[in-house]
Image: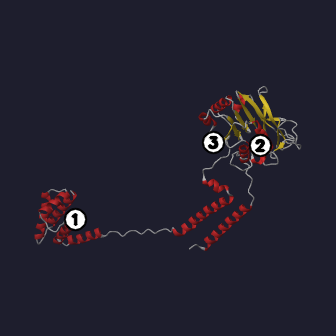
Amino acid sequence: MLSKKSKIFIIIIIAAIGLLTFLEASEPEPVNWFPSYAKTDKIPLGTFVSYNLIKESFSDDIVKDINKPPYEFLLDNDTISGTYFFVNGSIGFDNSELDRILNWVEKGNTLFISAKSISSNLLDTLLIDTDNMVSFDDISTKPLVELVNKNLTTERPFLYDRDISNPFFSEIDTINTTILGVTQLYNDTLQIKNPKLNYIKQSFGNGEILLHSFPEAFGNYFMLTENNYEYTQNVLAYVDSTKNILWDNYYKSGKTFYSSPLFFLLKNRYLKWAYYILIIGVLLFVIFEGKRKQRSIPIIAPLKNQTLAFTRTISAMYYEKGKHKEIVEKQNLLFLDYVHHDLRIPTNTLDEKMLLDISARSNNDLEDTKKLFKYFEELHRKAHITKEELTRLYDMIVEFKNKS
């Protein structure tokens, strides 16, 4: 039974867990601003909305999900054509991967990248440099964005009403680069007076490369705020809608699929707390129930075998009183018991076959075996036995057993 102190302690723990669970369930769930850019995520910076917008605007057959690294995909599908579409916080290619992508673009395909940090080896190849906009007059870093094409320009720029880092293209190859979009930090007015480049296009071989430094435009939050989705649609106007859209799922900060069942359990706040309470309950059960049942078992020493000591005492008493005859009879019985139990030979009748079996199983010569039994017989017929005869019998028995 649990003590009164233990019961009070358990009640306090259960009450504390219940209170924490209630407070957690009552508190509004915080907004997850992790820059996932995964097509399955419905968080503010997931691309669930933009991905489905592209599928609806183009067609399901044109939009293809690519879950492999670009190098591996293009190695196996070098004949495929279209636009390789990258959206993430950062995109970084190694040299071999970039070479394969650019070789593919040269054949008449398009590379589209929307990211805050774009692979430096790609920028070096295109003679492009980047920088970040910094506000000296105001701590706010909310960006305004718009396109420069008059057919795609709206009455006012689009505002992203959150403070973020704002990279832009500070240097470009003016001969080969086309400016598509500009940006500026918001400064109490919805006008771009000091434009910075954030969307450019450059021809490369028979293809072209589109670089965009505002990936938030493809995030759920931006697209679902007022009419901001129009900006994203206008950005996509430069993508050929008749060719494949190879949507990259590899260069993503968030996962597009989850293999662990714990993810689905911990993603839901109620299931998560139920899981935690279950674990805490199991631990409490192990601590208190185990303590109650796993009592120490006292060590009870086994009874000592006093047979040998008793035998020695009796034999010493017989020897001191000169009862040699009785000792010989006991020795005879003990030796026959040894033959029966240790050598597994019946001792009902003493004949030639029995002596032969005893000799074989004890590794003694047949003559020595006969000699020992003959000596037993001689002492049995004598009325009085001397100390020397008793000693000789003992030596013969010991020598016989040592050979076994």
Which label is found at residue 338? 1
What amino acid type is highlighted by mark number 1? Tyr
> Which x, y percent locates residue 263?
63, 53
Residue at image point 74% right, 62% down: 26
Label 3: how many residues lie within 10 Å, few (<14), some (14-19) or many (20+)? some
Estimate the spatial distance between the alpha carbons at disc 1 and disc 3, rounded to whole Å.
82 Å
Determine whether the residue tagged by mark 1 lies in a helix, strand or loop.
helix
Q: Quadrant of residue 156?
A: top right
What amino acid type is highlighted by mark number 2? Ala
Determine whether the residue tagged by mark 2 lies in a helix, strand or loop.
helix
399 left or right of 218 in image: left
> Which x, y percent locates residue 101?
66, 32
Q: Are marks 3 and 2 in contact (CB under 8 Å)?
A: no
> Which x, y percent locates residue 329?
17, 70
Q: Which of 184 and 112 is in front in this view?
A: 112
Residue under label 2, please give it: 217
Q: Quadrant of residue 331?
A: bottom left
Indicate which disc, 2 or 1, sits on the residue closer to the N terminus. 2
Q: In this view, does 256 lie above or below 351?
A: above
Quadrant location of the C terminus in the rendered image: bottom left
